[in-house]
Every structure is written in C-alpha cells, then in structure tokens.
Amino acid sequence: MSAPTHTRLHPAPRGGADTRLPWWALALPVLAFVTLLALVLNPSDAPAAAGEPALTHLVERAQQLITG
C-alpha cells in the first residue's frame, strides 16, 4: 500500500523562507553594540566604574593600548 504524493502547483521560491528581516532586527544589535562601545571608550560614564577601581584601571589601560 503506497501513500499518495502531493505535488506543488507552483515551484518553491529560490530563497526558501522569507529572507527579509524587519528593521528592528538589525537596529537593536547595532544600538547595543554602539552603547557598549561608548562605555568601553569612556568608562568614567559607567555607573559602576567608581566601585571597582581594578576594572576601571584595566579598561583605561586597554583604551591607552588601542589608541596608541
């Protein structure tokens, strides 16, 4: 006993599923990256920077190495 096969009336699209992303799927990661980059470049603006001097010193040293 064989099962019936279903054939498509229209060929499948070449890209598969809908490949378009909504605008926020790109905007939110970019916003998060820019925010974290701003905190790394200027750690004194971070609210927790005063509580952990060793971490602040490490981030400042990394910033000095990156900028030359």
Image: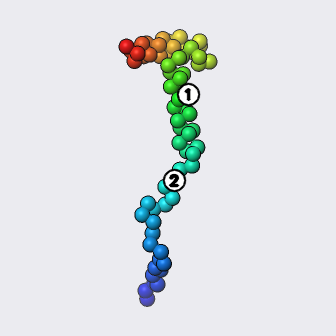
Label 1 and label 2: CA atoms lie apart by 26 Å
Instruction: Specify whether 11 is left or right of 35.
Output: left
Front position among marks 1 and 2: 2
Query: Pointer 1: what residue?
Result: 35
Is 48 positioned to the left or the right of 58 in the image?
Answer: right
Q: Residues within 10 Å of mark 2 (few under 14, many from 20)?
A: few
- Mark 1 and mark 2 in contact? Answer it, CB < 8 Å: no
Give amino acid for label 1.
Thr
Q: Quadrant of the N terminus?
A: bottom left
Q: Secondary structure at mark 2?
A: loop
Compared with residue 42, is residue 16 higher up or lower down, i.e. above or below? below
Circle number at residue 20: 2
Q: Is residue 48 visible?
A: no
Please tell me which residue is depicted at 44% across the width and 72% down the height of the picture.
Answer: 11
| Residue drawn at the location 47% of the way across and 16% of the way down | 59
Q: Position of residue 58 (x, y in %)?
A: 46, 14
Q: With respect to residue 5, does 27 lie above or below?
A: above
Observer-nearest of 59 and 3: 59
Q: Secondary structure at mark 1?
A: helix
Q: In x, y percent, where is residue 29?
A: 53, 37
Q: Residue furthest right?
A: 47
Task: Name the residue located 58 percent from the left edge and 43 percent from the top edge.
Answer: 24
Q: Quadrant of the C terminus?
A: top left
Residue 46 lies, in percent from the top left, at: 59, 18
Mark 1 burial class by Cα count in 10 Å: few <14, some 14-19, many 20+: few
